[in-house]
Image: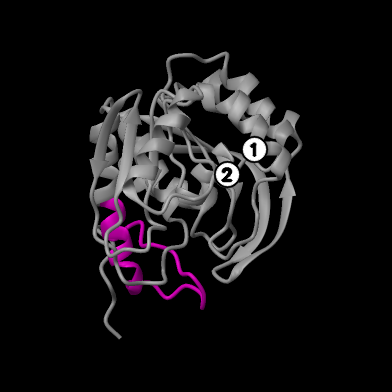
C-alpha cells in the first residue's frame, strides 16, 4: 500500500525548499504527497524578497478538505508564518488524533531572512509543539524556541533537545549542521532517552532546503510505520545522497538545492 503524507508549509518558487521540496521528497521516498499552503514567498537561491501569508481560515479549509476525502498517514508542518496560522493549524489537526506529525520550525531562510514572525514563536510553542510526534529544529531554531544561546557543543545540543521535549513534543531531533566542525551530528531526545546520529559534512554551498527535505523524509518513513529512530536514520542517509549529488544540478547562483532524485535521474553528458 502506498502511504499518503500531507505537507503544511510555504511555497518556494525556485523549487528547492518548502512545499516543492516536500513533494519531491515524498515522491523520492515512495509515498503520495499532498500540500496545504500557508504562505507564498518570492525567493530564489540567493534569498527571500517577500512573504505573502495565506489567510488562516483558508489554511484550515485546505487541511480539512484533504482529511475529508483522503486517508492521511502522516503530516509534516513547515513554514507557519504567523501566530494566527499556527493556531488555525493546531485547532484543525487536533481533531485528527493518532497520526504522526513532524514539526519543522522554519524560522530563518538559508540567506538569513526571517520566515517566522516573533509573535508566532510563542503560538507555535504553545499550540503546535504539543501535537508533534517529532520536532526537528536546527541549532538556531532550538535556541530561539527556548530563548537561549545557540548550542556550540554536543552537551548543550542534548540539553536543549531534552528541554524542548519537556515542552510537550513526543520526541525532538536537534540538528547539528550549524556546528563549526567537520562532523554534522544530530541528537534525538525521546523523554530522557537519547540517540545520536552521526554524519560527515559535505563541502558544498548547495544546501537550500536541507531542513525541509530531512523532515519530509522522516514524515514519509513514519507514514510507513517505522519508529522515529528508523525514520531518522533512513532520512539522513537519503539527505546525504541528495547533498552529495547537488552539484549535478545547475539551479541558481546562490545556495543551490539538494538533488532530491539523485538515485533516479542520471546526469546527461555535455
**Residue underneath mark 1:** 121
| Badge 1: residue crowd in 10 Å (few <14, some 14–19, many ≥20) | many
Between 146 and 89, the residue placed more toward the observer is 146
Tag 1 secondary structure: helix
Give residue 210's position: percent from left, percent from top. 42, 55
Q: Quadrant of the N terminus?
A: top left
**Residue underneath mark 2:** 144
Give residue 185's position: percent from left, percent from top. 29, 50
Which label lies toward us, 1 or 2?
A: 2
- Say if residue 31 shows up in the picture: no
Dominant secondary structure of the residues highlighted in magenta in the image: loop
Q: Quadrant of the C terminus?
A: bottom left
In whole angstroms, how far apart are the C-alphas of marks 1 and 2?
8 Å
User: Which image quarter: residue 144?
Assistant: top right
Q: Residue at x 61, y 67 (%)?
A: 47
User: Which image quarter: residue 86?
Assistant: top right
Task: Give the extent of the magenta segment.
Answer: 238-262
Mark 1–mark 2 CB contact (< 8 Å): yes
| 262 sits to left or right of 37 | left
User: Which image quarter: residue 181?
Assistant: bottom left
Q: Residue at x 25, y 41 (%)?
A: 196
Q: Residue at x 32, y 41 (%)?
A: 187
Amino acid at each position: 500500500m502506498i502511504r499518503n503524507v500531507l505537507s503544511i508549509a510555504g511555497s518556494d518558487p525556485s523549487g528547492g525548499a518548502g512545499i516543492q521540496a516536500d513533494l519531491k521528497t515524498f515522491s523520492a521516498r515512495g509515498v503520495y504527497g499532498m500540500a496545504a499552503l500557508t504562505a507564498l514567498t518570492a525567493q530564489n537561491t540567493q534569498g527571500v524578497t517577500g512573504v505573502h501569508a495565506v489567510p488562516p481560515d483558508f489554511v484550515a479549509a485546505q487541511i480539512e478538505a484533504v482529511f475529508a476525502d483522503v486517508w492521511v498517514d502522516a503530516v509534516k508542518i513547515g513554514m507557519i508564518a504567523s501566530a494566527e496560522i499556527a493556531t488555525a493549524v493546531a485547532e484543525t489537526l487536533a481533531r485528527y488524533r493518532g497520526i504522526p506529525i513532524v514539526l519543522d520550525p522554519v524560522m530563518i531562510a538559508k540567506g538569513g531572512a526571517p520566515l517566522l514572525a516573533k509573535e508566532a514563536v510563542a503560538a507555535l510553542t504553545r499550540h503546535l509543539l504539543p501535537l508533534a510526534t517529532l520536532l526537528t529544529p536546527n541549532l538556531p531554531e532550538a535556541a530561539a524556541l527556548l530563548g537561549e544561546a545557540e548550542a556550540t557543543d554536543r552537551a548543550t545540543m542534548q540539553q536543549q533537545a531534552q528541554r524542548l521535549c519537556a515542552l510537550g513534543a513526543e520526541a525532538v531531533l536537534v540538528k547539528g549542521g550549524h556546528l563549526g566542525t567537520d562532523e554534522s551530528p544530530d541528537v534525538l531526545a525521546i523523554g530522557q532517552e537519547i540517540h545520536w546520529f552521526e554524519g560527515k559534512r559535505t563541502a558544498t554551498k548547495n544546501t537550500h532546503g536541507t531542513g525541509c527535505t530531512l523532515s519530509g523524509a522522516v514524515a514519509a518513513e513514519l507514514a510507513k510505520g517505522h519508529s522515529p529512530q528508523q525514520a531518522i536514520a533512513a532520512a539522513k542517509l537519503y539527505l546525504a545522497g541528495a547533498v552529495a549529488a547537488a552539484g549535478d544540478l545547475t539551479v541558481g547562483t546562490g545556495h543551490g538545492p539538494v538533488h532530491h532524485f539523485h538515485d533516479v535521474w542520471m546526469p546527461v553528458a555535455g
